[in-house]
Amino acid sequence: MLNENIKAIRKSKGLSQEELAVRLNVVRQTVSKWENGLSVPDSDMLILISESLETPVSALLGETVAESEADSLKSISEKLEVINLQLAQRNNARKRILHWLFISLCFVIVTVFAVLIVLNSPYQRWNYNDPETAVFGAVFHVFEYLFVRLAPVIFIGAVAGIFLTRKKE
């Protein structure tokens, strides 16, 4: 209902999605997602939309003016509860993705460390008379040098991220 109302009111005001997006300081795709029901604006953005379209928030939420104030507040609170539930689900999905990214980062760091241990710095035995070998050896050495010094810090941060983003039950 909110998506249909935003679209109808925007069109009645003669605004394109792009013009409304500029007024709200968002990208046009965000307005499109709202109008197609793929996402919902948060409460602060809902107020900005109502101001930009010069329409009360209650009209955006589908309230009619004839309803009593008690029914109106109840309906608005129910709709805001649905919006908050959708926002909580989106935040949980982001948290899950971030959790698995941290796990993947730890796995990559451990794997690269294992590869570096197995290789045992082979560039130290290379003949550096050839310029290409010298450049490649220097690059490999810089990578190894930086990785060995930075990876433990990143690994500790990723492990902390795993614990901070784990699902608490």
Image: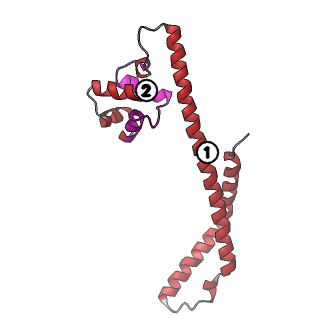
Label 1, on which residue? 95
Q: Main secondary structure of the magenta part?
A: helix
Looking at the image, what colour scheme do you see?
secondary structure
Label 2 crowd bin: few (<14), some (14–19), many (20+), radius 10 Å = many
Vertical placement of 142 versus 132: above or below? above
Q: How many marks?
A: 2
Amino acid type for the residue under numbered disc 1:
Lys
Question: Quick one: label 1 or label 2, which is nearer the N terminus?
Answer: 2
Alpha carbons under labels 1 and 2: distance apart = 27 Å
- Image quadrant holding the N terminus, namely top left
Please report the residue visible at 55 percent of the width from the left and 21 percent of the height from the top: 78
Disc 2 marks a residue whose amino acid type is Leu
Query: Which label sits on residue 59?
Result: none
Q: Observer-nearest residue: 69 or 152?
A: 69
43 is within the stretch colored magenta: yes
Secondary structure found at label 2: helix
Name of the residue lying farthest toward the right:
169
Q: Residue at x 69, y 46 (%)?
A: 166
Can residue 148 be seen in this snapshot? no
Question: Of circles 1 and 2, which is in front?
Answer: 2
Side of 167 relative to 71 (left or right): right
What label sits on residue 2 in the rendered view? Answer: 2
The percent position of residue 150, horizontal first and vertical second, equals 64, 64
For the question of whether residue 61 can be seen, the reply is: yes
Residue at the image point whose x is 70% and y is 55% from the top: 159
Residue 107, placed above or below residue 99: below
Which quarter of the figure is the C terminus placed in? top right
State which region is magenta.
29-57
Q: Quadrant of residue 88?
A: top right
